[in-house]
Amino acid sequence: MTIDTDDLPPAEANELKRLIEAAGFFELPQTSPPPRGAADYLRYTISVTCPERSHTVHLTDPIEDAEIQALVEYLEAKAR
């Protein structure tokens, strides 16, 4: 699924940008090690592209960082 901030209402686009910034998305490593015994946990791949940069991360549930979890929850809600 692709979410383009140009297609969102301004308030939602600003919220998504805020969540990306709060999560420190562009500073996250590309891959986080899965938790022990995480064979059946959900995996997420999130890519963010803006004019000045692009970054992709691969995450595995459970996500311990509350800011990253908030970003994932926002994206999941948009996917429904």
Image (cartoon, rainbow, N blue to C red):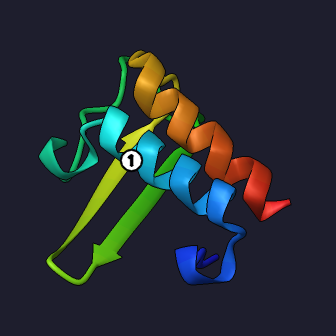
> Residue 31's spot in the image, x, y percent?
22, 47
Relative height, residue 43 to residue 78 (above, below): above
In which quadrant of the rendered view does residue 65 lie? top left
Residue sticking out furthest to the front: 10
Q: Which quadrant of the figure contains the C terminus?
A: bottom right
Residue at 44% in and 43% down: 18
Relative height, residue 35 to residue 5 (above, below): above
What residue did someone put label 1 on? Answer: 20
Residue at 14% in and 78% down: 52
Question: Is 52 on the left-hand or right-hand side of 1?
Answer: left
Q: Which quadrant of the figure contains the N terminus?
A: bottom right
In which quadrant of the rendered view does residue 32 lie? top left
Q: Secondary structure at mark 1?
A: helix
Whether residue 1 is visible to the viewer of this picture, yes or no, is yes
Question: Is 12 on the left-hand or right-hand side of 24?
Answer: right
- Name the residue nearer the viewer: 37 or 46: 46
Residue at 35% in and 33% down: 22
Whether residue 29 is visible to the viewer of this picture, yes or no, is no
> Residue 42's spot in the image, x, y percent?
59, 41
Amino acid under disc 1: Ile
Residue at 30% in and 55% down: 57
Mark count: 1
> Residue 39's spot in the image, x, y percent?
50, 35
> Residue 46's spot in the image, x, y percent?
43, 60
